[in-house]
Amino acid sequence: MACNGNPYRSIEAEVIDVITETPTIKTIRFEPKESISFKTGQFVEITIPGVGEAPFTPSSRPDEKDIMEVTVMKVGKVTDKVHELKKGDTIGVRGPTGKGYPIDKFKNKEILVVGGGCGLAPIRSLMYVLFDRIKEFKQVFYRAGCKNPKEFLYKNEINGWSKKDDLNLRLTVDKGDDSWKGNVGVVTTILDDVKMDYKNGIAVVCGPPIAMKFSTLKLLEMGFKDDNIYLSMEKNMSCGIGKCGHCRLGIYYACKDGPVFTYAQIKDFENIWD
Ligand SMILES: Cc1cc2nc3c(=O)[nH]c(=O)nc-3n(C[C@H](O)[C@H](O)[C@H](O)COP(=O)(O)OP(=O)(O)OC[C@H]3O[C@@H](n4cnc5c(N)ncnc54)[C@H](O)[C@@H]3O)c2cc1C
Ligand code: FES
């Protein structure tokens, strides 16, 4: 457990940059007063003094211990204030908490990463790890979608990834515009050309609940096994450390046992996509 063993202790951090990614999403780059290590897929609680705290999965490199980034969609009380942050402001960081992606289990496998909307934030952190360890995997496929070209997170960076020989990448938008030359349609429309050994492959899915649901159904239809589909479940949270029960998911607490679960772990519970 981070924060010197006290899971409730928040570390002060200075905002060092604010990047406007899309009309509704900003990336906050900050420097905690004490270095924080996390595993890709784990989350931190960000505190805005006088307002409250909310969970976010770092979108930055896990090996960058002195600087962290979270990419935040503006949806309410805390995230509105996150969007008002400026360079030099102070925030709090608690965690990291939860279980990240079990990268060692992906060794010698083909991996399909499927992301959408704000789900591309945790996935960016995962991709950094996959790129660093690329020789350990048979092949990596990246399929991502957003509502429209303006809402595409990390557009320039992802365009750079498209030149990588060791990554099979395709992007889509629900609705195109004059600037968009790629596929138009939801993210499941760009899964058909993923040619791999589905039965033994790994799939990682992160995005809005509706995209996670239909991507998972498509992956099952393609032949992926329940226990090879990894889902990042963003349930409503409060304590973030398995004490309050807010994030209950069947027999699990999403904060402590997740937020990354295999579909096999959670498929029999009610309302998993709510
Ligand atoms: C493990 C985890 C990782 C997350 N990572 C990211 C991330 O990287 N980037 C990002 O933008 N968001 C992320 N979220 C969602 C983020 O935590 C919520 O958007 C945030 O808590 C909303 O707080 P608020 O005070 O601004 O909104 P509120 O004023 O509390 O609510 C506004 C709306 O958001 C909904 N909402 C509130 N809390 C959550 C929640 N925890 N999850 C989903 N919907 C919620 C409410 O139902 C309401 O409709 C993550 C959530 C979890 C649980
Ligand atoms: S948020 Fe309190 S138990 Fe998960």
Image (cartoon, helix red, strand yellow):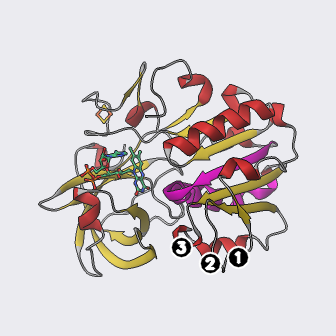
> Residue 150's mark?
3
Query: Which residue is drawn at the image coordinates 39% and 62% (left, top)?
Result: 72
Residue on which the image places disc 2: 156
Q: Quadrant of the N terminus?
A: top left
Q: Viewer-proximal residue, 104 or 246?
A: 246
Residue 116 counted in the magenta span: yes
Task: Label the magenta part by its dominant secondary structure.
Answer: helix
Rounded to the nearest whole Å, what is the CA distance between mark 1 and mark 3? 17 Å
Ligand 1 within 8 Å, label 1 CB: no
Query: Which residue is drawn at the image coordinates 23% and 76% (left, top)?
Result: 89
Answer whether residue 253 is visible to the viewer in this image: yes
> Residue 160's mark?
1
Q: Quadrant of the C terminus?
A: top left
Please, what is the three-letter code of the amino acid marked with disc 2? Asn
Q: How many numbered badges does the structure rendering display?
A: 3
Rounded to the nearest whole Å, what is the CA distance between mark 3 and mark 2? 12 Å
141 lies left or right of 226: right
Query: Which residue is drawn at the image coordinates 49% and 57% (left, top)?
Result: 118
Q: Viewer-proximal residue, 63 or 89?
A: 89
| Magenta segment | 109-135
Rounded to the nearest whole Å, what is the CA distance between mark 2 and mark 1? 6 Å
Q: Secondary structure at mark 2?
A: helix
**Around disc 3, counting alpha carbons within 10 Å, would you say few (fewer than 14), some (14 to 19), or many (20 or more)?**
some
**Around disc 1, counting alpha carbons within 10 Å, would you say few (fewer than 14), some (14 to 19), or many (20 or more)?**
few
